[in-house]
Amino acid sequence: MLSPGILFFIIFSYIPMYGVLLAFKDFRIMDGIMASPWVGLEHFQRAFSDPYFLQVLENTILISVYRLVWGFPVPILFALLLNEIFHQKFKKLVQTVSYLPFFLSWVILGGMFINILSLNGPINIFISILGFEPRIFLAIPEYFRSILVITEIWRGFGWGAVIYLAAISSINEEMYESAYLDGANRFQRAFYITIPTISPIIVIMLILSCSSILSAGFDQVFNLYNPMVMNVADIIDTYVYRKGLLDMDYSYATAVGVFKSVVALILIIGVNMTARKLGGKDYVLW
Amino acid sequence: MIVLKKSISEKVFDILNYFFVFCILLITIYPFWNQVVISLSGGFSSYSMGMLLWPAIISTEAYELVLSYSLLWTGFRNSIIRTILGTLLSLIFTSLTAYPLSKNKLPLNSFFTKMILFTMLFNGGLIPNFLLIKNLGMLNTVWSLVLPGMIGAFNVLIMRNFFKSIPASLEESAMIDGAGYFKIFFSIILPLSAPVIATVTLWLVVGHWNAWFDGLIFITDRNGILLQTVLQRIIIENNTSDIQEILANIHSSERIGFTGRQLQAAILVVATIPMIIVYPFVQKYFVKGIMIGAIKG
């Protein structure tokens, strides 16, 4: 019963893992992976001595950090505000609508934002009413990362709030009642009951999101970037895609990919150890 | 429960909060609404101020053109095939893998579990995966879309945990009656696992429906194109020959002022509608799934 599953993982997970040997070889299509000559760390040296790759690495980290710094608190705030809404139907409506973007692909969302931010889009119409010059926002390097961060927040805040709302709903109602009887007002109740109760989850979510620092949102960047903003927008994943599948530079692209996978592996192990120390065994991944 | 009385500052907060949350609601809806408005705008009106909230001249022309575009239907067909086939295969093989792993007496259980878990932490990356599919001769077939992600380690864990929670006494009595493992699995375990199967199914369906990157790199044949790739060509790449192909269906007199913009918006709306209809029913299972996932694997 187990054999098809194990066979599957060997073929589709472990053979590609073996394929990372490409990163240490000079791949020739005729020879295959096995017979291609070894070149050691040459591809890694090439990457790290290439200023463009270093730029890509910087973009990736910057975009991730911006996403984390600006994006992380939003679902928490949204959950706290939604928790103060007592009209259940309205609350349910807002929640359901806020999930919608999460269920759509970045192809659809990307197309939508390209339209909205285009020269004839509503934002430009609005600012030209105010008397400003219309501009193609997605082609301006200074704006591009902000657009990534804002659109990602727009997509994810509703869904991101799910876990916090669940944590809030598990708080015992009697705690609020006794706080009320002791004279605590609503802000005090939120501040001294709600926030401390959900703070372990906040810490865990924060640590977990640190492990994906080298994944700056391939789907999003791929569907929004364009040659005008390449210098600020190109991230590791888009770079690997273009180098590997468009330029057919298989070995080099694999090397860059391996670098990313290894860093991610180290980060996730580190994160797990941190979570174990802080949160106890309830929050560790394994 | 006691009724909490509100002070004036709390009432002010309430009003502000409702207003703020209402604004959030509008911000979420507006981009979609904007596409609907553009898609319904006839001729030049998509450039006028009125398009911000309501089309100046309502015209369904863009939809007529888009719906008569054959590549869109090819995309819909292929995406539906891939979603159904991919989801079925995934369900069958994920549950078949998870069931034996839920039995502690399985030899090498922890080895196999670790082997599967490790795939969550490390993977070969884009190029080795691409070369594998290429070498297996799967390019331009539906197998390149459904096989590589068929069994997800996370789904195996969720199912395994659910199977573990089913009382062993049920299986034991079936075994005394002479039922084998496969019989027990299909006639006892699966029917009892409806909640977890529903959750994983919806997960898979949404994942397959929205997947676009595999379709982009593995499928180059026009007949195998996915809906997401059609969208990508027309909306993201703004592919002129595709747009001209759609526009070729109207008379030149009506064509004045009619641009690719309405078409792009219309195709976007058409592609979004299935998910808008489905997701309100799907989302509660997703929420459940998050909760299952949050419990340690």
Image (cartoon, rainbow, N blue to C red):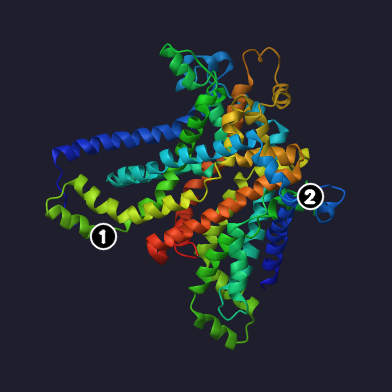
Same chain for marks 1 and 2?
no
Query: Front-most of B189 and A10?
Result: A10
Between disc 1 and disc 2, the foreground one is 2
Where is the N terminus of chain A found, in terms of image quarters?
A: bottom right
Residue type beneath disc 1 = Asn
* Occupied quadrant, residue A244: top right
Mark 2 closeness class: few <14, some 14–19, many ≥20 residues within 10 Å: some
Which chain hosts label 2? B
Element marked by disc 1: loop
Answer yes or no: is residue B107 visible.
yes
Point 64% across, 12% down: residue: B256
The image shows residue B127 at horizontal and vertical percentages of 72, 48
Q: Nearer the viewer, residue A251 or B112?
A: A251
Q: Which mark is residue A172?
A: 1
Q: Which residue is mark 2?
A: B134
Q: Amino acid at mark 2?
A: Lys
The subunit carrying tag 1 is A
- Most distant residue in the bottom direction: B176
Instruction: Judge left or right: residue B98 versus residue A127.
Output: right
Q: Position of residue B147 (x, y in %)?
A: 70, 56
Crowding around mark 1 (Cα neighbors within 10 Å: few <14, some 14 to 19, many 20+) is: few
Left or right? Give the position of B275 relative to A129.
Answer: right
Cα distance between the residues tagged 1 and 2: 56 Å
In the image, residue B44 sits, relative to residue B96, either above or below, namely above
Residue A103 % position (x, y) = 52, 44
Q: Secondary structure at mark 2?
A: helix
For image coordinates 49% across by 75% down, the residue present is: B166
Residue A210's place in the image compared with B249, above or below, is: below
Whether residue B68 is situated above or below residue A89 in the rendered picture: above
Foreground: A174 or B122? B122
Q: Is residue B248 above or below residue B274?
A: above
